Image (cartoon, rainbow, N blue to C red):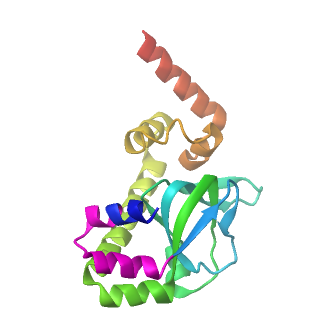
Amino acid sequence: MSDVFENYLRSVMPLTHEEVQQILSLSVTKKVRRRQLLLEEGEVCLYKIFIIKGLLKSYLLKSDGSEHIMRFAPEQTWLTDHESYMHQTPSKYYIEAIEDTYVLLWTRDHFNTLMDTIPALKAYSIRIVSNSLNASQERIRMHISATSEEKYHEFVATFPHLANRIPLHLIASYLGVSRETLSRIRHAQRMVKSS
């Protein structure tokens, strides 16, 4: 599994073998079973998470007990609750495995140490946070201005490898539409393709 992470790191930033080993040495590998939580609302987010294999979701619980999916995190992506992690405050989110998942975890102190000693990692971390902010802004824009069909088409275009991997009710939650609406959209899309 460390090979997967090393290959990922080398594809996104220039690092020596020693720097990769230093990054790995301060991480913890963990297997997260399907439906197991890595973070609950009210807890402080203690870890920066890298997904080696599997799929996680970040979500809020609405007052009626239903989930509102904020983000999906498949292989070779990072996930954390930035606000809770950075400020060590209680989280408003849950992070849960959709399927059995292997992750690498870094505490805030360990990751800060790594950023202080490996400039390329610090620059890349800033880029990840910036990209996350941009994606959040785009998601808000789509939520406000796009039709249900446009939201679904954007999801499939952005995450083609996830559309058939994630249960329909979770995609509907992510898009902010009902499961029935999403079923109608997918049915109409299949009808257009078959004609």
Quadrant assignment, res 22: bottom left
Left/right of residue 119 with respect to residue 166 in the rendered view: left
**Where residue 32 sits in the image (x, y, percent)?**
64, 61
Which of the 4 image quadrants contains residue 92? bottom right
Query: x, y percentage for residue 133?
Result: 39, 67
Q: Residue at x 30, y 80 (%)?
A: 18
Q: Is residue 145 above or below residue 5?
A: above
Main SS, magenta region, reads helix
Give the percent coordinates (x, y) of residue 48: 50, 74
Could you say which quadrant of the image residue 132 lies in? bottom left
Q: Which residues are magenta?
A: 8-27
* Percent coordinates x, y for residue 102 in the rendering: 56, 60
165 drawn magenta: no
The answer to whether 159 is drawn above or below residue 3 in the figure is above
- Residue 22 magenta: yes
Quadrant for the C terminus, please. top left
Residue at (67, 57) in percent of width and height: 33
Q: Nearer the viewer, residue 1 or 33?
A: 1
